[in-house]
C-alpha cells in the first residue's frame, strides 16, 4: 500500500547516473555510520544506545498489523504502532483508506476493535486510530528536529505482509522537501506493508512514521517526522467508526447497490472498485427513481482505469440478476442481456468496434428504449439498433464486471437525455465568432454577446473544437474557460442580488468552487447537505432553543463527523472550495462557517450569523432577538467564546472595528472567500494573469472595489486589452475620493492618455 514516486522527465542514462551516485552516497553513509559506531562503541553504551536486537524485542509488543476489509475479505495491509496506552495507534492515512472496515492485530495475535479514527490528515499522510483495548504498550516519541544526517536508525513493520520484521540503516537527509512537505529521508530497504511503521533512533524512540517508498532505488525511503505526529495528537479531529464508514458512501436515498463491489462518490463522481459478487465479478448500482416503461433514455459518462475492464450502463434491471448492460470492454462496445445469476443465463446481443469510442478518456454512453427497439449511442453517435423485448420496466443505473475500476459522472434518465446540439444558425455564429477572434476582426465583448443565449452549448462546442483544431486550440480553451467563468459570475451576481435573507449562501459557495472546476456537480453537494439536515431535523435539541441547538450542531459537525480546521496546509486553495471541505471535512474558518450557517438556516435555528473578525471568521449566535452575540470558533472544533474572548483571540490589543463584530451580509462573506483565493496572487509588482478571473468576480459583486479595479487595469494593459484597461482607469478618475492629491490624478490621466494613444 506504499505510494510510488515515478521518475519524471529523466533520460535512461541520467537515471542510471543518478542511481549510481545515490547508491554511492548511501553506501558511503552506511560505511561512515559503521565506522563511527565502531569507534564510539563505549560511548554509545553509556549514552543509552541499544543493539538492533534489543530495540526489536522492546518494540515488537507495540507494533500492529492493519488490514483493510472488503467484501472479498482482506485486500490491503500496512503497519502501525501504539502511541498511547489508552488505545491510540499511529499509521499512514493511505493505509486506512476511506470508508473502509479495518482489522488491527497485535504482535501477540490479539485483534483490537477500532472504535474511531481519532485523527487523520491526508496531506501529512498520517492517521491515528483508537481501539477499544486499554493498557497497550506505547512507544516513546523522539524529537525529529534533532535528527542528524548519518544517524543510525531502525525501522519495523510488515513487509509484504510478513509480520514484525526489522531492518537498520542511516538517515540520508534529516529534512528533505517532498512535494512541499518536510520529511526524513532514510537509506533503508522499505517494502510493501512497511507503511505506517515506526522509524526509531538507537534508543528506541520514534523519529518518524514510514510513509512512502522511492522508485529510484530499493534502499531509499521517507518518513513523516514525529514533530508532525505530535501536532496531530495535540489537535485531533475524531470521527466514530460508524461515521467513518459513511464517508464517500453513496446516498441510499438515491442509489441501491446490488451484488457487492465498492461504490463511492466524490466531487459528484461515482467510483467503483473490487469485484462484485455476481458471476464474472458483476455488480450493479441502480438509481432509485424508476423511468417510464414504454419509452425512456438513460445516459452516463464513464472512464475505465484499464481498457481491459468493463463498465457502463445497466437498464431494465429488476433489482436482482436480470438486466441489460451497454458498456465498453477490451476497447469494443457490447450490449448484453442478463437473464439470471449464472454464466448460462446471459447473452451477448451485439459486440462491435466504433471510432466514436475514445479509449482512456471519458465516454458518454446513452441508450434509448422504445417498445421493442433498443438504440445505443456513444458520444452522441448511434452505434447500434436492434429489436429485443426480453425485459422491460425496472431501474436504470451503472454496471461493472471483473476487477474493473471505473469512474462515472452525469448519470441521467428521462424521456430524452441526449445532449442538445447547437442549431445551425447558432453554430454558424459560433464559427464566425471564433474566426473573427482569430483574425482580430471581432472584439471579445461582441463575441461573448453573440453567444450569451447558448452558454452551456457554446462552451461544449468550444471545448470540442479546441481538441479538433490544433491551430486554434489555445484560443478556444481560453475562450471556453472564460465563457464558463462569466456564466458562474452571472449566476452568483443574480443570487446575491436577492434580499440577504433569501440568498442561498451554500449554493453561492459551491458556485465559487465550480468557477475553478467546471465539472463540479453542485446539485450533488446540495443533496449531501440536505441529507445532513434530515439527520438532524427530528433531533429534540435542534428545537430546544438556539443555545442548545448550537451545542448539538457542534457535536454533530466536530465530534461525530470530524470537521476541523486545516492544520498542515492552511493556504491550499482546497480549503476555500466548499465541495472539497465537505469531501475532506477540513477547511478554513470561513468555509466551515458557511457550512455551519447554512445548516442552521435549513434547520430553522434562529439567531445564527457570520461574524467577520479580522484574521478569523467565526459564527455568531444569540439567544434572543437584539441580544449580545456569542461566538462559535469553528476552526477550533466549535469552541464557545464570548465576543470579548473572540476579539482577544484575534487582536493583540483587544480592539477591532465595530463592523467586525456585527453580522456579515452574504455578499461580503462571498467576497471574503474570493479574496482568500485572490490574496496569494496579488503582488503589485508582479500579479500573474491567473488573478484576473478573481478580480472579475470581485468587481462583479463589488464594483466599488478600487484596489481590484486598479490591478485589473494593470493586467488588461499587459494582455494588450488597452480599451478595456482605459475603461477601468476612467472609472478610477471619476471615483477619486475627495482630498486626493493632484499628483495621483495626474498619474491616472497620464496612464489614460497612454492607453488611448
Image: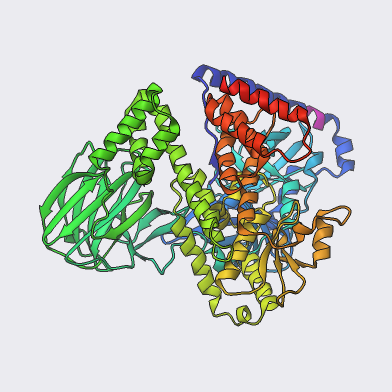
Q: Nearer the viewer, residue 705 or 344?
A: 705
14 vs 89, left or right, is left
Q: What's the residue at 86%, 41% (across, down)?
A: 45
Toward which corner of the image does residue 237 lie, by quadrant?
bottom right
Color theme of the render? rainbow
150 vs 339, left or right, is right
Q: What's the residue at 33%, 68% (across, down)?
A: 288
Give the residues drawn in magenta, as a range: 33-37
Kindly tell me whether residue 394 is visible in this rendering.
yes
The stretch drawn in magenta includes residue 422: no
Does residue 39 sit above or below 324 in this rendering?
Answer: above
In the image, residue 353 lies at what x, y percent?
Answer: 19, 39
In the image, residue 241 lies at what x, y percent?
Answer: 58, 66
Q: What's the residue at 51%, 47% (across, down)?
A: 489
Q: Nearer the viewer, residue 252 or 56?
A: 252
Toward which corner of the image does residue 689 lie, by quadrant?
top right
Does residue 314 sit above or below 151 in this rendering?
Answer: below
65 vs 479, left or right, is right
In the image, residue 615 lies at what x, y percent?
Answer: 75, 51
Q: What's the residue at 69%, 31% (across, down)?
A: 684
In the image, residue 10 lies at what x, y percent?
Answer: 52, 22
Toward which corner of the image does residue 722 lie, by quadrant?
top right
The stretch drawn in magenta includes residue 35: yes
Q: Nearer the viewer, residue 486 or 732?
A: 732
Q: Nearer the viewer, residue 747 or 545?
A: 747
- Give the overall secondary structure of the magenta segment: helix
Q: Quadrant of the C terminus?
A: top right
Amino acid at each position: 500500500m506504499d505510494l510510488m514516486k515515478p521518475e519524471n522527465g529523466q533520460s535512461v542514462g541520467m537515471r542510471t547516473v543518478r542511481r549510481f551516485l545515490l547508491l554511492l552516497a548511501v553506501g558511503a553513509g552506511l560505511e561512515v555510520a559503521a565506522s563511527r559506531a565502531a569507534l564510539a562503541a563505549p560511548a554509545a553504551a553509556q549514552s543509552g544506545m541499544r543493539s538492533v536486537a534489543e530495540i526489536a524485542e522492546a518494540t515488537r509488543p507495540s507494533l500492529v498489523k492493519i488490514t483493510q476489509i472488503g467484501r472479498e475479505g482482506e485486500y490491503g495491509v500496512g503497519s502501525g504502532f501504539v502511541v498511547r496506552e489508552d488505545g491510540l495507534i499511529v499509521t499512514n492515512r493511505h493505509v486506512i483508506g476511506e470508508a473502509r472496515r479495518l482489522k488491527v492485530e497485535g504482535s501477540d495475535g490479539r485483534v483490537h476493535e477500532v472504535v474511531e479514527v481519532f485523527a487523520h490528515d491526508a496531506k501529512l499522510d498520517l492517521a491515528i486510530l483508537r481501539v477499544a483495548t486499554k493498557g497497550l504498550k506505547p512507544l516513546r516519541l523522539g524529537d525529529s528536529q534533532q535528527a542528524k544526517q548519518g544517524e543510525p536508525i531502525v525501522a519495523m513493520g510488515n513487509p509484504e505482509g510478513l509480520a514484525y520484521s526489522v531492518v537498520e540503516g542511516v538517515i540520508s537527509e534529516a529534512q528533505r522537501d517532498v512535494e512541499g512537505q518536510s520529511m526524513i529521508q532514510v537509506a533503508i530497504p522499505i517494502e510493501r506493508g512497511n507503511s505506517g511503521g515506526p522509524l526509531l533512533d538507537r534508543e528506541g524512540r520514534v523519529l518518524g512514521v514510514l510513509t512512502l517508498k522511492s522508485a529510484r532505488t530499493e534502499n531509499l525511503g521517507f518518513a513523516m517526522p514525529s514533530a508532525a505526529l505530535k501536532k496531530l495528537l495535540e489537535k485531533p479531529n475524531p470521527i466514530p467508526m460508524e461515521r467513518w464508514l459513511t464517508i464517500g458512501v453513496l446516498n441510499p436515498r438515491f442509489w441501491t447497490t446490488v451484488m457487492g463491489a465498492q461504490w463511492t462518490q466524490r466531487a459528484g463522481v461515482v467510483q467503483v472498485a473490487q469485484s462484485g459478487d455476481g458471476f464474472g465479478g458483476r455488480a450493479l448500482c441502480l438509481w432509485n427513481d424508476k423511468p417510464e416503461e414504454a419509452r425512456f433514455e438513460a445516459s452516463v459518462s464513464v472512464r475505465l482505469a484499464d481498457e481491459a475492464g468493463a463498465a457502463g450502463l445497466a437498464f431494465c434491471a429488476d433489482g436482482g440478476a436480470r438486466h441489460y448492460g451497454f458498456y465498453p470492454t477490451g476497447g469494443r462496445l457490447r450490449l448484453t442481456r442478463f437473464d439470471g445469476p449464472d454464466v448460462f443465463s446471459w447473452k451477448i446481443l451485439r459486440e462491435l468496434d466504433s471510432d466514436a469510442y475514445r479509449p482512456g478518456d471519458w465516454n458518454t454512453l446513452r441508450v434509448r428504449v422504445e417498445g421493442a427497439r433498443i438504440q445505443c449511442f456513444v458520444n452522441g453517435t448511434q452505434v447500434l439498433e436492434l429489436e429485443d423485448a426480453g425485459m422491460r420496466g425496472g431501474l436504470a443505473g451503472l454496471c461493472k464486471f471483473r476487477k474493473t475500476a471505473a469512474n462515472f459522472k452525469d448519470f441521467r434518465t428521462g424521456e430524452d437525455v441526449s445532449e442538445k446540439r447547437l442549431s445551425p444558425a447558432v453554430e454558424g455564429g459560433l464559427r464566425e465568432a471564433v474566426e473573427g477572434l482569430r483574425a482580430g476582426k471581432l472584439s471579445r465583448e461582441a463575441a461573448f454577446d453573440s453567444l450569451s443565449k447558448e452558454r452551456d452549448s457554446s462552451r461544449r462546442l468550444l471545448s470540442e473544437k479546441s481538441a479538433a483544431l490544433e491551430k486554434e486550440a489555445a484560443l478556444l480553451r481560453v475562450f471556453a474557460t472564460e465563457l464558463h467563468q462569466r456564466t458562474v459570475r452571472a449566476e452568483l451576481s443574480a443570487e446575491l442580488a436577492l434580499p440577504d435573507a433569501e440568498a442561498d449562501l451554500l449554493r453561492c459557495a459551491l458556485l465559487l468552487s465550480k468557477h475553478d472546476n467546471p465539472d463540479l456537480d453542485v446539485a450533488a453537494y446540495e443533496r449531501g447537505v440536505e441529507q445532513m439536515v434530515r439527520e438532524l431535523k427530528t433531533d429534540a435539541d435542534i428545537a430546544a432553543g438556539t443555545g442548545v441547538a448550537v451545542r448539538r450542531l457542534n457535536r454533530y459537525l466536530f465530534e461525530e463527523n470530524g470537521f476541523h480546521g486545516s492544520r498542515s496546509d492552511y493556504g491550499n486553495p482546497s480549503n476555500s472550495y466548499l465541495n472539497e471541505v465537505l469531501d475532506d471535512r477540513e477547511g478554513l474558518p470561513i468555509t466551515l462557517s458557511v457550512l455551519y450557517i447554512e445548516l442552521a438556516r435549513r434547520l430553522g435555528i434562529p439567531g445564527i450569523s457570520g461574524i467577520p473578525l479580522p484574521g478569523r471568521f467565526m459564527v455568531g449566535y444569540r439567544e434572543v432577538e437584539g441580544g449580545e452575540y456569542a461566538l462559535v470558533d469553528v476552526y477550533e472544533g466549535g469552541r464557545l467564546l464570548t465576543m470579548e474572548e473572540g476579539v482577544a483571540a484575534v487582536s493583540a490589543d483587544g480592539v477591532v472595528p465595530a463592523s467586525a463584530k456585527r453580522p456579515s451580509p452574504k455578499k461580503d462573506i462571498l467576497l471574503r472567500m474570493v479574496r482568500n483565493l485572490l490574496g496569494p496572487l496579488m503582488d503589485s509588482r508582479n500579479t500573474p494573469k491567473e488573478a484576473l478571473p478573481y478580480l472579475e468576480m470581485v468587481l462583479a459583486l463589488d464594483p466599488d472595489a478600487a484596489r481590484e479595479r486598479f490591478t485589473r487595469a494593470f493586467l488588461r494593459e499587459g494582455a494588450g486589452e488597452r480599451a478595456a484597461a482605459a475603461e477601468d482607469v476612467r472609472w478610477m478618475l471619476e471615483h477619486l475620493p475627495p482630498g486626493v492629491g493632484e499628483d495621483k490624478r495626474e498619474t491616472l490621466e497620464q496612464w489614460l492618455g497612454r492607453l488611448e494613444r
